[in-house]
Image: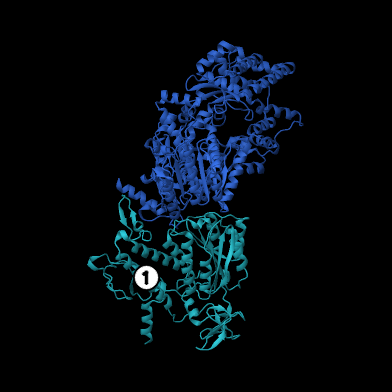
Amino acid sequence: MKLEVEGLTVYFPYERIYPEQVEYMRELKRALDAGGHALLEMPTGTGKTAALLSLIVSYSLESPQHQHQLKLLYCTRTVHEMEKTLAELRLLASHLPPTTKSRLLALGLSSRKNLCVNPHVLSAQSRDSVDAACRRLTASWVRTLAHDNPQVPTCPFFEAYDRAASAGPDAVLLPPGVYTLGDLRSFGRSKGWCPYFLARHMIRYANVVVYSYQYLLDPKVATIISKEMQKECVVVFDEAHNIDNVCIEALSVSIRKQTLEGATRNLTQMSQEIERLKATDAGRLRAEYNRLVEGLAQRGNLAITDAWLGNPALPDDILKEAVPGNIRRAEHFLSVLRRLVQYLKSRLLTDKVETENPVNFCAAINSQAGIDQKMLKFCYDRLHSLMLTLEITNTDEFMHIQTVCDFATLVSTYARGFSIIIEPYDERMPTIPDPVLQLSCHDASLAIKPVFDRFQSVIITSGTLSPIDLYPRLLNFSPVISRSFTMSLTRDCICPMVLTRGSDQLPVSTKFDMRSDPGVVRNYGRLLLEMVAAVPDGIVCFFVSYSYMDGIVNSWNEMGILQDVMQHKLVFIETQDVVETTLALDNYRKACDSGRGAVFFSVARGKVAEGIDFDRHYGRLVIMFGVPFQYTLSRILLARLEYLRETFQIKEGDFLTFDALRQAAQCVGRVIRSKADYGMMIFADKRYSRHDKRSKLPGWILSHLHDAHLNLSTDMALHIAREFLRRMAQPYDKTGCGSKKTLLSEEDVMRMSEGAMDTY
Amino acid sequence: MYGARVAFQPSAATASSSKEKKRRGEDDDDEEDDNEGKGTEAWERAYADERSWEDLQEDESGLLRPIDTKTLVHAQYRKRLLLRSSTGGSAASRIQKGLIRYLYIVIDLSRAASETDYRPSRMAVVARQAEAFIREFFDQNPLSHVGLVTMKDGLAHRLTEIGGSPEAQIKALMGKLECCGEASLQNALELVHGYLSQIPSYGHREVLILSSALNTCDPGDVMETVQRCKKAKIRCSVIGLSAEVFICKHLCEETGGTYTVALNESHFKELLLEHAPPPPAIAEYAAANLIKMGFPQRGAEGVVSICSCHKEAKVGGGYTCPRCKVRVCELPTECRTCGLTLVSSPHLARSYHHLFPVAPFDEVSPHGRPGQRLPTTCFGCQQSFVGQGGAQPSLRTSCPKCNQFFCIDCDIYIHESLHNCPGCESQRNSSVL
């Protein structure tokens, strides 16, 4: 259908549209007009992606007055979401008028592992080894070698692509259209071109690029991939409720004992390599030295295949100076690294937890290992240059020394917003020594700042962004639009409840002093038992942590509750092992399909809580046992809280509650993925009934949380659940009627906008 | 001996009088109950059956107000009628209906059936309503057959063979009421599938599952069984007592049945009775074929003969099979000796109205169009439309053919019991005269 949003013709790929989608588009359009950033919260299942894509695509294709066409950079968290977005985009493309359609080029970009078509390379296991295998076949020196000696293996796809590209950049172009990763692969296969490098080339010309968060937020990757994006871009971060954590992770490094041992091995290997090179081709080392004297850390025009992960620091913070003299020679540099590794090793030997700030840490390195801050800063670039000189292709084996250099560069570049924490063992298992040195970033705004500065509009959107005023403070930006939309429903298809008491009227909570109380454990068990008997098909339970889940499941087993549960439904448990969990999920779905019924025990903040949907009969009820606070004794968290308080004036309690509640909302939001769906959510903890906690839940949950459902005991919850399930099983009219119209046709939208005009 | 076609030619229909009588009887019962209730003081009455608080509803502002049950019932009725006529059965497009039905009622006697959210227990409610349903079913489908299957302890058990006598079925059901163990949908379907696949092709195979349980404990893949039922053209319908279960929904969608979930006992009754009128015939079966039927004569009073069904001598009554002259006690049935289907002509006539239902009446706004004068009384009962004391005028409808106006009560009576429009009938008579 076609609709008008404030004078802009928007092509929408469906016959009907939800009213909140129209609202969403209107706000989005205003943000784009203003050329500013926006923060939009809209519940899942309301077609956020469709609304977003249709508006931005229509906006960029329909406005000829823009010199540069707006480009859409759409960031997703997972490859699966990327594919879904591209599928949506393809549907949209099929509804565009032919003239506009021919101008639309959209593609997904992912790592080599997902795009490579060379069977030899693909046989490698991990992402890094695929990258290394590709580099072994395509690095410029390998190809020069192959030029002289046909015995040296190269990648036929890349060679073909390179031959075609040598005729000029326009010789290798994708015809307009929407390309998923699979389409790129099959296009590459049919043409014999390497899809990965083709995609890398094509993102310059595409109107829409769908890729992962890292490609914009992680400076190591962003400098390589996204450097050439022009300012006229709309950047969308979808499912962005955890964007602050992504930003922080992009700038954090952790070093373990294995890392340092691996780094030592790498150093030995490199020094051998240098010795060999000195004997055979001393000129190459000298050339590098001369280049460094001239002040070029990077070698200038690198071949596209040689480009490697970029500097871990943000582009603005990289020193534009010559490499210091004392690490220009390869041997000298290696000895500096050796001293650094040795120093880090000595720090790991500590038997108590240490926290330090980067300034002190650098000073300590300077005094004890004799490496000054400037040398540390150049560590990464110098290593990069050395590895190119040594023509090292198996980069995956050199990950360890890279990590050490990442660390060195970051620790010396940033004085604020970071801290170094050395823990000799895991808090939960004090008997097993597992020393780890972490450089943790506390300031999410650091990594995202270049994105906000560079691009015209940045849209941050998700189903759970409440409280919506906290994100601008955390990420340190000022949005022009920040709105939270609610869902228009034909029937009350979500039923959130706060359960504060067990059937014996004693309060339930996972508060630290109460969680091991047998009464609380029993009450939680009774709750589950009552619910498995009353709720059909699938139930999902979320616990606050793995250790708590193990403990409570054990106690239930001893009390015989688990056996009773099994009479009604099969029990599946998430573990830290991905394969095991996937298997459990498969069988869970099977049990739901066949009518046997199943319960899935999972952990908030786990893989399942973030990425797996329990829609329709796979999740009729989700029980959140407790409030999923972070582990508050964690040093990293404490350091971050302190930083947030000092820098952004965010109180510790506020941030912890916000973080816990967004996780809880994320967990319970798993059950409802569309409007035709229905599901219940039980927040089983007395703390949820308090206003400061509850008010941080997203609006679309709060609007369905009636006052009567705020302080329930198990038997009352059971009664409500039964009534709700009966009511939901009745047939209903999907379009809604009268004032509660929830599916709008083209005429309805017209009428709506006319009505809006009249009121002005 | 006569041959009768399944698809009948239209002729003047006779309304079923027995049903009408029954309805009257029920009304009387209700009145008696009311009188009893009024006799005692409010605090002396047991509130368990009355549940007066359920008649209250909270509105948006949190105030309590009584549910207007009457308008609710009327609205529901209208909706159902329109739905029925839109899915088929309107006089204009004649849809063939399966009049000869072979129905297995599967009753869930698993552990979940002992729950007491229906009073006194789900099992008792199911049994009570099933009894009423079986009577109503035979009343509306005299040519059909019913059998009973129970699910308990993970097994399916055939309680009664498929047959045409309501009394035998009800007796068997009431004798076997205890519940334990799990329910197994697959076992029940397999069992029913085994029996129904032997049914002759003109018969419509149906299963009605009254399910209390929310899960099914199956020995194998229930999806395969669903596909086999679909292949065998068995129409499976489920009425759930507590919540929507995916596998039941899947089963009904695949086999063309309906899936409903009851809100409370009266809703359950309503849902169950919706299965009494025959469903539209499946397209593949639509080819009308001839079935041999016998119309036996009623035996003369005072004649002593041995009946074939009970194997005992009886005086008077009974029917004689026109082919083999054997004596049977009840109709409709199958002759024990020669296997002929024995019916009486009123049976056929009673099935007939399903094929030519009265078209649904159009709703008329109480004030009418300007310039049009509406009659003030109902054509059926001659009562005034305008309520006493300036009460809101009640809903009225008009027949699209004869344009006579009826009150909603007459509308219900015409469509549910009479199956003839008095307006159209009287018009025809006058034209003949």
Q: Position of residue A549 (x, y in %)?
A: 53, 37
Q: Is residue A176 shown to the viewer in this render? A: no
Q: In which quarter of the image is residue A728?
A: bottom left
Query: Residue at point 36% right, 52% down?
Result: A751
Q: Which of A626 and A468 is in front in this view?
A: A626
Tally of numbered tags: 1
Q: In which quarter of the image is residue A733?
A: bottom left
A419 displayed left or right of B233: left
Q: Where is residue A260 in the image (x, y as percent from the top left)?
A: 63, 21
Q: Nearer the viewer, residue B259 or B168?
A: B168
Element type at mark 1:
helix
Give the amino acid at mark 1: Asp
A280 displayed left or right of B282: right
Q: Where is residue A435 in the image (x, y as percent from the top left)?
A: 59, 23
Q: In which quarter of the image is residue A393?
A: top right
**Figure coloring:** by chain
- Looking at the image, the residue that sits furthest to the front is B44
Q: Which of A510 and A639 is in front in this view?
A: A510
Pointer 1 indicates a residue of which chain? B
A384 displayed left or right of B245: right
Q: Is residue B285 shown to the viewer in this render? A: yes
Q: Position of residue A192 (x, y in %)?
A: 67, 40
**Chain A rendered in what hue?**
blue
Q: Quadrant of the C terminus of chain A?
A: top left
Q: Mark 1 points at which residue?
A: B29
Q: Would you place residue B387 above or below residue A578 in this image?
A: below
Mark 1 surroundings within 10 Å by alpha-carbon count, few (fewer than 14), some (14 through 19), many (20 or more) = few
- Looking at the image, the residue that sits furthest to the left is B389
Query: Residue at point 56% right, 12% down?
Result: A366
Any idea which chain is the cyan one in this picture? B
